[in-house]
Image (cartoon, rainbow, N blue to C red):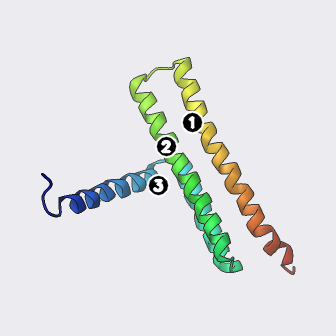
Amino acid sequence: MIKEGGFVRNRLRSFKFAFKGAWSLIRREPSVQVQTGIAVIVTVAGFYFKITRMEWMFQVLAMGLVLAAEGLNTAIEKIADFIHPEFHIKIGVIKDVSAGAVTFAAIAAFIIGVLIYWPYIAELQF
């Protein structure tokens, strides 16, 4: 039997843990710090160039995809290191594949950024 309010309270607790994990990623992981910095820069650029609602949607989706991939990559690396702390060829392959997934996300985000910002940058008068 579920207590009254138990479901909502548990969901709020889950969000608390999720935000704690996100903050931990930002504070401790250099790759996430770099991607967060890039996200801040393109967000400022979005306001500067007054990008459209559709462009914002693609930009936010791309930023979320890269940061989520970085988080999953970090989790996979931490689990692999915990399970097998010393070097192992198969653990190395797992880590490389995980990093490769981040690379796919980052390339897609870069292409989205170019597609959004190239027309705005091309119109600038120097």
Q: Earlier in the sequence, mark 2 or mark 1?
A: 2
Sort mark 1 into few (<14), some (14-19) or many (20+) by Cα contacts within 10 Å: some
Sort mark 2 into few (<14), some (14-19) or many (20+) by Cα contacts within 10 Å: some
Can the viewer see residue 41 in this picture?
A: no
* Structural distance between the alpha carbons of marks 2 and 1: 8 Å
* Structural distance between the alpha carbons of marks 3 and 2: 13 Å
Residue 124, how many percent across, how many down? Answer: 83, 78
Q: Residue at x 15, y 54 (%)?
A: 2
- Specify whether 24 is left or right of 98: left
- Residue to which mark 2 is pinned: 72
Q: Secondary structure at mark 3?
A: helix
Q: Residue at x 79, y 75 (%)?
A: 120
Mark 2 touching mark 1, by CB under 8 A?
A: yes
- Specify the quadrant of the image occupied by residue 115: bottom right
Mark 3 touching mark 1, by CB under 8 A?
A: no
- Residue to which mark 3 is pinned: 26
- Residue to which mark 1 is pinned: 98
Q: Earlier in the sequence, mark 3 or mark 2?
A: 3
